[in-house]
Image: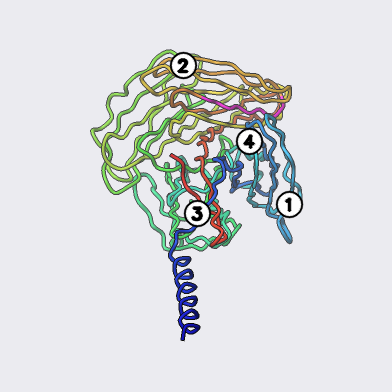
Amino acid sequence: MKLRIVVLLVIALAGGAVAIDHVSPAKPVARSTVSLAPAAGVLSCPYVTEPNGIAYIQLANVGPSSASIRLAIGASKGAPIGISMALPGGSTSSLRVPPNAAGRAAAVIEYSGGAVIATHMLFLRPSSGPVFRAGGGAASPCARAGGQDVVVSGASTLGTDAVLAVFNPGSADADVSVSLIADGRVLQPQRLSRRIVPSHARRDFRLGDFAFNARNVIAVVHANAGRVVAEALIRSSQGVEFLSGQTPSSELIAVAGQSGSGANVGVTVIGQDDAGIDVRLISAAAQTSIAGFPPSIPPAGGRYLGIPDQGQGAPAAYAFDVTVGSPIVAGTSWTTSRGGPQEMASLPGAVPSLHWGAVLGAFQPGTGTRAVIVNPSGVPALVHVTTFGPTGQTAQDVSIPAGRLIELAIGRGAGTFAVFVDSKGPVVLALRSLAFLQGKAGTSVAVAGESFVAATPEAVAIDPRAGVPAVLPTP
């Protein structure tokens, strides 16, 4: 009897011990120190090549650490062309697209480490067909896939060839619908609705097939599923140019590398409501409110203005602020001529930011490459500007007065030039390059900068029970 009681007591105690172990709290999980994940990203260049053209991709690493880069370019046959390279911090590189690339190819740039920006450039000869199309150069930044809507503004189908390229850099198919705003009329062609863009594929749409002889055409690319990048190539008797995609916003700065004759700015409402807009013209010498703008502009409505000369064709910028209603898109274009040859360039609207980067290539001995930095705010902005080029890098600090812009020379002659801007106040950056040589076609190209946003620090805790890290945002 005593032996049975002892055995039962031992079993009870053992069971209690097991029960206590099951309900006791887990041991504290050790956390690592707070650290930033390595910089990495994907840049997409939708319209890299065109038949009978010469294409380049310019790269810049404006960060301090080295970057590992892999490019994938669509090939005429077989798998994409793969190119791997290392780009040291604070350096630039220029790559000519191989001749075995597809006639109309896109490119994807994957990188890890550093802070990488890229631009793709295309050079075309004058056409010899029944309708004359001038030759020249075009440039556009390689962009990150954005939100649901990507808008390409500034196109025309009146005496102009305009082709919209939509590229899907994702690993799954994208479902997109394209609507057009042609001279204020909204067009939703059935052939542009619910189009599938396969993974890592590009789809081209000739805008003249849907909006015939329209002076001003805007393409709104809506991603029903997935994310895409879009831009357009336009060719006319005045030259060749890329139109970069942008995201509608309530605040945009439209920079023009040239003012006066042949320079224009446009703004269009994207949305279901009217928009009230305040407009200012900014130059190196003054800031002026633009009178005569209507109290509100209806949906799909827009205004197009000539840019008055700011003195010997100096750069200018328009600041658009939506006071009420739908967001907008904006852009500038200008045509430069030198004794007969002429060439056009354009820039999309940009949202002011604190950190910017841009890269641009120059291929002729007499090319001048310049940066335009705009301060649209009501207080001066202290800006640290770092320039990267064939001879290394230089840095300078400049103060931009409230409501003013500055223009800086960053390169002379051939080479790949990049600029990184670190500002104490919100600004906008653009680069432009211009060359006209005797007996040759002119080249006028421009790119808007890419805004950099710092990574958010994260604390990483490894849960040994689940075997996966738990990411905890730090305050």
User: Please, what is the three-letter code of the amino acid marked with disc 2?
Assistant: Ile
Residue named by callout 1: 82
Residue named by callout 3: 227
The image shows residue 422 at horizontal and vertical percentages of 53, 25
Could you tell which of marks 3 and 4 lies nearer the N-terminus? 4
Q: Is 251 left or right of 393, judged from the image as shown?
A: left
The image shows residue 423 at horizontal and vertical percentages of 49, 24
For the residues marked 2 and 4, what is the alpha-carbon distance in whole angstroms? 31 Å
Q: Residue at 40% across / 24% down in the picture?
A: 376
Number of residues whose C-alpha sits closer than 10 Å to that of mark 3, classed few (under 14), some (14–19) or many (20 or more): many
Residue named by callout 4: 137
User: Please, what is the three-letter code of the amino acid marked with disc 4?
Assistant: Gly
For the residues marked 3 and 2, what is the alpha-carbon distance in whole angstroms? 37 Å
| Residue depth check, mark 3 versus mark 4: number of the one nearer the observer | 3
Whether label 1 touches label 3, CB < 8 Å = no
Q: Residue at 44% across / 46% down in the picture?
A: 151
Occupied quadrant, residue 88: top right
Check if residue 94 falls in the magenta segment: no
Numbered tag placed on residue 211 in the rendering: none
Element type where label 3 sits in the image: loop
Q: Is 232 left or right of 413, judged from the image as shown?
A: left
Residue named by callout 2: 400
User: Please, what is the three-letter code of the amino acid marked with disc 3?
Assistant: Arg
The image shows residue 176 at horizontal and vertical percentages of 46, 58
Q: Residue at 38% across / 57% down in the picture?
A: 188
Quadrant assignment for the C terminus: top left
For the residues marked 1 and 3, what is the alpha-carbon distance in whole angstroms? 23 Å
Q: Residue at 74% across / 48% down in the picture?
A: 83
Task: Determine the residue located farthest toward the front in the rendered image.
Answer: 2
Q: Magenta stretch: give its range.
A: 414-422
Check if residue 416 falls in the magenta segment: yes
